[in-house]
Amino acid sequence: MSKKLEEIEEIKMSRKEKRKKRDQDKKEKRKEQINWLYYVVIGGISLTVVVFFYSMYSMYQKTVDWKKAPETKIADIPAYMLYLPLEEQEKVKQYNYIQSEIFDLSTGSFKNNANDDNIKKLTDLYEDLPKTLQARVKDNYTRVTELYKIKSNWEKLVKDKEIQEKVTPADISKFVEDNKDVIFKYLQERAPKKYITEVYNEILEVTKDVNVVNELLKTVNSNFNFNKGNIEVKEDVSSDFIANYDRLKRQLKNKWKIVSGYTDEIIFKAKSILEKHDKAIVDYKDFKKIVDERDVFDKWLKSYNETKDNLLNIPDLTGKSKEDIEKILKEVNLKVVYNEVEVEDEKEANKVIRQKPAKDSYDKIMAGSTIVVDYTVKKEKKVEKDEDKKDEDKDNVERRLQNRPEDNTRNNRTENRRNEGRR
């Protein structure tokens, strides 16, 4: 009996152990599933965090690049740039930024940052642009670089109203000859032209100075003898020539080193020059160099005077009639071409409303040039055709009345009655 009980107990124990083991296996399996799900969730979260931080980093880099670029309002960005790739947009922005640092397109003048380094940067950026974008900015690029070349060369000759040392009238003449085509090209354009206008006016002032410098040199030559390195005042010279020299010098608009460095010293230190020949020889050598260039100077002066004589003041023809225009142009060597403009109001007829070139655009014009004017005329009404039509209608009516049958019958009856009365 006891043996059977033991067997029964063993069977019960084995069943419990199996059930316990089965439950334990289920727990282990569930634990593995939970661990696997845990690792999947952690991995997903980690991947999400990595993607998030990568996006934030990319946005940060773009923000840094954006901050480096010049601040530009979207309204100020040309429409075509909005469709360009980001890289090309950045190139155009950098190009426009450097150009704006050099040149103000709204006034046509250079800024303080206009220098060789920035011009080189601008050229490098321009050459780095795609061909299609180069074509868009070509006109402004050419304008800035050509005007800067003129600016750089002009400042080697004249800067701050001072003619640089060792610059002669021949150098001024060569500059004008080499750059006149570019100067006149930009003077005639409609864009703002502050800088080129200033340079043009400075050139006019310098060319006027050339005549004065020539007179100063003549004054020195006529009152001093230059002989074997010695400078001697001529015997018949009075002190009046110094007053004349001062009067001429006051007419100069610019400071000339030739005058202040050489002729002034010769004139105002004439006594010391006579006493100290060694210093006179040095001054004489410097002055002789100027005298040797007189031939070149005279040729340039002759050419300038010929051009100056052919320059005429532009007459203001606005509001003038043809009779007034003929009187004005009769006195000068200018021609006129009329473009008739019809107007309704008779009071506004028979006068000039526009002219080209206009008085406010240019002060001078070459002799023999033509001025084109818009001249108003009274608009004619088409009355003659209507009156002809009325006369034609009247004739047709009269012709119809004459050919009416009733009138013919009436005329025949009247004629028959007359014949019967005669019988």
Image (cartoon, helix red, strand yellow):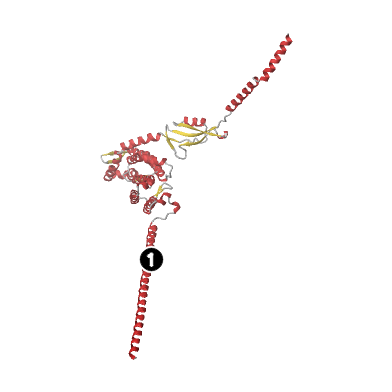
Q: Position of residue 213 (x, y in %)?
A: 36, 40
**Visible in this render: residue 272?**
yes
For image coordinates 73% across by 9% down, the residue present is 422
Q: How far across and down, in percent of the image, does residue 258 sit?
A: 33, 43
Residue sitting at x 38%, y 66%: 48
Residue 380 occupies quadrant:
top right
Camera-side residue: 180 or 245?
180
Q: Quadrant of residue 56?
A: bottom left
Q: Where does the image place residue 295, in percent across and percent down from the top left? A: 31, 36
**Viewer-proximal residue, 70 or 63?**
63
Q: Furthest residue to the top?
A: 423
* Quarter of the image where the N terminus is located: bottom left
Which residue type carries mark 1?
Thr
Quadrant assignment for the C terminus: top right
Residue found farthest to the bottom? 2
Circle 1 packing at 10 Å, graded few (<14), some (14-19), many (20+), is few
Query: Looking at the image, which residue sits at the far front?
Result: 1
**Pointer 1: what residue?**
48
Regarding residue 239, the answer to whether it shows in the image is: no
Return the x and y of residue 230 as percentages of the image width and height: 27, 41
From this view, report whether residue 358 is shown above or below residue 407. below
Secondary structure at badge 1 equals: helix
Residue displayed at 26% across by 45% down: 278
Say if 58 sits above or below 219 in the image. Answer: below
Pick the front one: 119 or 240: 119
